[in-house]
Image (spheres, grey):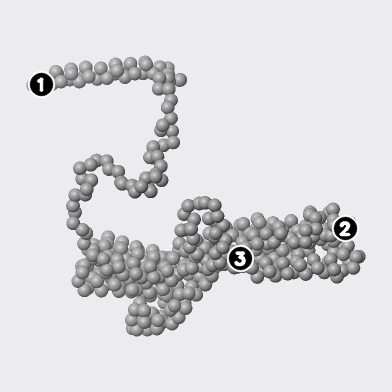
């Protein structure tokens, strides 16, 4: 369910990226507004107690604490820790998305090597595709909450036409259960091998090509399980979380404004401004980064920026059926194209695209004019001597060629 906004930033301009801040779905304020309200409430409460509830000697003790906390708060490298953590989490998020296998390569491979419009090749192609999609969806139901809600029980696979009742019973009877998502892949290999024995697949190279695609698909499913099994080390997440929260707990004291009449007013970093604007801004940035990392640690849930696995399943399902059985596998008639008599052609432009076109790709120094008559340095030859030597060599070669023609027997 990653929030799409590419169409809004196709062309940069004033206020383009500012308008993104007004979007609520996927917005950082949706993640941190409760934390911001809680932090501001505690900050205001401590400030009011300091100003109106404490006696004078207690105010001096509090001001000493503010100065002490402020001097040591900067020792926590929050930006350094958060930067590494965010980079690691996002790299893992993108790797997990790229790990998800797509059935389209297998569909194209089996359609090319097992062609035919009769019932037998069509049935094998369609059955193999069902099995591959079944393996993908079964894997997703074990890793992704949205897929689990869509297919909560095996009966939903039968209702959706992914498996038959007999196939579901065979899958459920397999022990251990973690092998069950890979059983349809084994069925696919068996069907492909049977098709080769029946002569529907032309040679062993085609068979090996299809099996390679099946094996690559299986490896993708296994990688998804491995990334779910081995997560980010808990101690790393704990260190980052503790660093951020301890930093802002210290900010509740260390970022308090001291009254101007206090003897410690000169030892703090700013005058008494009542509202901690830059502290709140710092809280939004750091806490926002932490919340983004917490959201992307496992993108298989229902957060706004989690992977929309339903779109992946639906696209593979629709496009795969179209490839294995919905398209005509015969190529169109071969005809002469409209550029048949031209050696170099140029694609047409619309008025808008012509206005936006740039100079042709010829290199950045192609149009740079330099002096053409210069001597070569360090070679012992000037440019004129080099040209004269080339002319002499060419004349000698022509003379040698005429002598050779005369010497040939008639």
Instruction: Give the SS element for disc 1.
Output: loop
Q: Residue at x 56, y 63 (%)?
A: 22
* In front of the other: 3 or 100: 3
Residue 348 locus on image (x, y percent): 31, 46
Q: Are marks 1 and 3 in contact (CB under 8 Å)?
A: no
> Number of callouts in the render?
3
Mark 2 — residue? Answer: 261
Q: Is residue 108 visible?
A: yes
Q: Nearer the viewer, mark 2 or mark 3?
A: 2
Mark 3 — residue? Answer: 29
Quadrant of the image occupied by residue 43: bottom right
Q: Is residue 172 above or below residue 122?
A: below
Residue 356 locus on image (x, y percent): 41, 45
**How far, Cα to Cα, is label 1 from label 2?**
120 Å
Q: Earlier in the sequence, mark 2 or mark 3?
A: 3
Q: Earlier in the sequence, mark 1 or mark 3?
A: 3
**318 left or right of 29?**
left
Q: Which mark is residue 409?
A: 1
**364 left or right of 304?**
left
Callout 1 crowding tier (Cα within 10 Å): few <14, some 14–19, many ≥20: few
Q: Is residue 369 above or below residue 261?
A: above
Q: Nearer the viewer, mark 1 or mark 2?
A: 2
**155 left or right of 398?**
right
Q: Residue at x 56, y 57 (%)?
A: 18
* In front of the other: 271 or 129: 271
For the C terminus, give its image quadrant.
Answer: top left
Quadrant of the image occupied by residue 171: bottom left
Q: Which mark is residue 81?
A: none
């Amino acid at each position: 369910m990653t929030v799409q906004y590419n169409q809004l930033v196709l062309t940069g301009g004033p206020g383009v990226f500012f308008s993104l801040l007004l979007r609520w779905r996927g917005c950082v304020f949706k993640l941190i507004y409760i934390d911001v309200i809680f932090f501001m409430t505690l900050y205001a409460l401590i400030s009011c107690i300091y100003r109106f509830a404490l006696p004078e000697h207690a105010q001096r003790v509090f001001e000493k604490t503010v100065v002490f906390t402020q001097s040591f708060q900067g020792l926590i490298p929050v930006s350094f820790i958060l930067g590494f953590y965010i980079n690691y989490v996002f790299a893992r998020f993108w790797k997990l998305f790229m790990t998800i296998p797509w059935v389209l390569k297998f569909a194209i491979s089996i359609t090319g090597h097992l062609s035919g419009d009769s019932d037998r090749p069509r049935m094998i192609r369609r059955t193999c595709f069902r099995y591959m999609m079944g393996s993908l969806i079964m894997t997703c139901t074990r890793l992704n909450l949205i897929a689990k809600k869509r297919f909560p029980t095996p009966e939903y696979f039968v209702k959706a036409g992914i498996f038959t009742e007999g196939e579901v019973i065979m899958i459920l009877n397999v022990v251990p259960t973690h092998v069950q998502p890979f059983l349809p892949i084994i069925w696919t290999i068996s069907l492909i091998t049977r098709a080769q024995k029946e002569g529907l697949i032309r040679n062993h190279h085609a068979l090996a090509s299809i099996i390679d695609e099946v094996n690559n698909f299986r490896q993708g499913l296994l990688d998804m399980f491995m990334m779910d099994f081995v997560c980010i080390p808990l101690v790393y997440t704990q260190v980052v979380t503790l660093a951020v929260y301890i930093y802002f707990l210290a900010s509740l004291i260390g970022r308090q404004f001291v009254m101007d009449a206090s003897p410690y007013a000169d030892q703090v970093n700013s005058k008494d401004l009542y509202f901690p604007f830059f502290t709140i801004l710092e809280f939004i940035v750091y806490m926002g980064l932490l919340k983004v990392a917490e959201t992307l640690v496992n993108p298989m849930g229902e957060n706004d920026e989690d992977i929309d696995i339903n779109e992946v399943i639906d696209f593979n399902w629709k496009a795969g059926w179209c490839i294995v059985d919905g398209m005509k596998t015969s190529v169109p008639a071969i005809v002469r194209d409209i550029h048949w008599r031209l050696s170099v052609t140029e694609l047409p432009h619309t008025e808008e695209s012509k206005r936006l076109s740039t100079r042709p790709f010829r290199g950045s120094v192609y149009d740079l004019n330099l002096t053409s008559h210069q001597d070569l340095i360090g070679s012992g030859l000037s440019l004129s001597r080099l040209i004269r030597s080339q002319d002499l060599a060419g004349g000698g070669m022509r003379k040698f060629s005429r002598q050779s023609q005369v010497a040939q027997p008639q």
